[in-house]
Image (cartoon, rainbow, N blue to C red):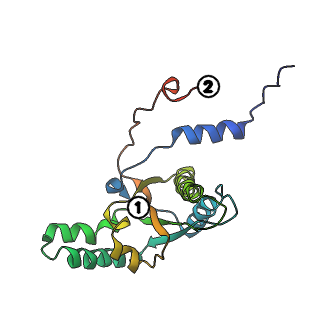
Amino acid sequence: MEAATPVLNRSAFAALDLLLSRRSGSAKAMTEPGPAMLQLQQILAVASRTPDHGKLFPWRFIVFEGDGRNRMGELLVKCLLESEPQASPERIETERGRFLRAPVVIGVVSRVREAIPIPEWEQILSAGAACQNLVLAAHALGFVANWITEWPAYQPTVKERLGLKPGERIAAFIYIGTSAVTLEERPRPALGKIVTRF
């Protein structure tokens, strides 16, 4: 007996269209407006509804908005000058303005618990899924998002001053705003090249 073909309603088609239309926008080409407080709460709520084996919540979020972006820029300048005292004025200004490129930046922190039955890899993947949910939720609300890390995500002093604990890493800094340029579609792999059947 053949399985019945599921009937898709308008909501399903709208959701698929949304997923198929998602694309990244450069943080360097973002402008206002960004998400308002309620929209940001919705984005974070969607991010927290992520596959999570063991209900560990192996991720948390750091929101940079308003003056918090300026304070992060000053933190980056201090960390830069501690490791590179001869940094050029141009590089210093780049770091000072790094988190000002978008109205909102969300840091996603991956928190891995060791010596438990849940594999570390699954905990890390859950943090990646939280990042993807953030990006999709921003897109659903009409914003553009860019999932990047860059040097601050890996610099020990930056991580320490952001309050990261042992076992925590930056999975992403997700920049959210409005694109100042028209987004271009990029090449996507043909399914025949990435799908096999066993």
Residue farthest to the front?
115
> On residue 32, which mark appears?
1
Residue farthest to the right?
1
Along the line of sight, the residue nearer the viewer: 102 or 122: 122
Identified by mark 1, the residue type is: Glu
Q: Give the structural element (helix, strand or loop) at label 1.
A: loop
Q: Quadrant of the C terminus?
A: top right
Could you tell me which residue is drawn at 75 percent across and 35 percent down? 9
* Side of 22 where 13 appears, left or right: right
Q: Give the structural element (helix, strand or loop) at label 2.
A: loop
Residue farthest to the top?
1
Could you tell me which residue is drawn at 41 percent across and 36 percent down? 185
Q: Position of residue 100 (x, y in %)?
A: 34, 67
User: Which of the 4 image quarters holds residue 46?
Assistant: bottom right
In the rendered image, which residue does mark 2 sit on? 197
Along the line of sight, the residue nearer the viewer: 105 or 58: 58
Along the line of sight, the residue nearer the viewer: 64 or 56: 56
Disc 1 and disc 2 in contact, CB within 8 angstroms: no
156 to 5, vertically: above or below: below
User: Which of the 4 image quarters holds residue 49?
Assistant: bottom right
**Residue 42 visible somewhere in the drawing:** yes
Q: CA distance from mark 1 to mark 2?
A: 45 Å
Along the line of sight, the residue nearer the viewer: 96 or 158: 158
